[in-house]
């Protein structure tokens, strides 16, 4: 039986009536037309569908929409402030960390979520967190360089 869910997405109040077990990824992409979160594996293993829920990085392909009720969601589309990119977005751009770009929104969200939880993570903490994000182009050296650049920017 369908239910109505209310949440804030990228600062905007939104309501959706749907099956409570429907993946949040489907709701974001199909109902709200937010295509930043990508469908990758459908098993929560690749991180392509990551968004922030109350500042915490969450994979949405295995998260029921009911879990997002009354929560604040930020997708890659809502990360920038007007025309000003988030420092992590700037770092990925400056370091050329995107090749095909499919994984990039989820990776950026993952890094932002990590920085919310640990503003000054160690290399080991960064690597542990990013193991949940797969880049099929294997651009990991530039991705790690981007993360280090973003950290340096936040430390200033």
Image (tube, grey):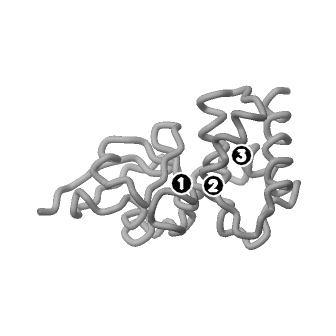
> In 3D space, how far apart are the residues under numbered discs 1 and 3 (Cα atoms)?
16 Å
> Disc 2 vs disc 1: which is toward the camera?
2
Instruction: Give how far across and how far down residue 152 sits, in percent.
Output: 85, 34
Earlier residue among tags 2 and 1: 1
Of label 3 and label 2, which has the lower sequence position? 3
Q: Is residue 39 above or below residue 142?
A: below
Please report the residue visible at 44 percent of the width from the left and 56 percent of the height from the top.
60
Q: Is residue 119 above or below residue 113?
A: above
Give me the disc on residue 86: 3
Q: Are marks 1 and 3 in contact (CB under 8 Å)?
A: no
Q: Nearer the viewer, residue 57 or 90?
A: 57
The secondary element bearing badge 1 is classed as strand
For disc 2, the marked residue is 133
Residue 156 is left or right of residue 6, and the answer is right
From the image, tell me which residue sits under label 1: 50
Between the residue at mark 2 and the residue at mark 1, the CA separation in whole angstroms equals: 9 Å
Q: Residue at x 26, y 52 (%)?
A: 5
Q: State the residue in front, 109 or 137.
A: 137
Label 2 sits on a secondary structure element that is: loop
Image depth: mark 1 or mark 3 in front: 1
Q: How many marks?
A: 3
Counting from the top left corner in percent of width and height, residue 145 is at: 86, 47
Q: Position of residue 117 (x, y in %)?
A: 59, 29
Query: Dot 2, how many residues are within 10 Å of its Cα: few (below 14), some (14-19), or many (20+)?
Result: many
């Amino acid at each position: 039986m369908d239910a109505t869910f209310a949440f804030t997405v990228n600062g905007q109040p939104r309501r959706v009536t749907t099956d409570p077990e429907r993946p949040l990824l489907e709701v974001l992409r199909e109902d709200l037309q937010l295509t930043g979160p990508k469908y990758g594996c459908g098993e929560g293993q690749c991180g392509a569908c990551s968004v922030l829920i109350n500042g915490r990085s969450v994979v949405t392909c295995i998260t029921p929409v009911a879990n997002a009720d009354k929560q604040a969601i930020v997708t890659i589309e809502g990360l920038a402030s007007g025309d000003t990119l988030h420092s992590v977005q700037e770092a990925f751009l400056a370091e050329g960390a995107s090749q095909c770009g499919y994984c990039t929104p989820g990776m950026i969200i993952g890094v932002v979520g990590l920085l919310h939880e640990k503003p000054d993570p160690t290399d080991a903490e960064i690597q542990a967190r990013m193991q949940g994000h797969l880049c099929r182009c294997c651009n990991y050296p530039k991705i790690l360089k981007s993360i280090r650049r973003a950290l340096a920017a936040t430390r200033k």
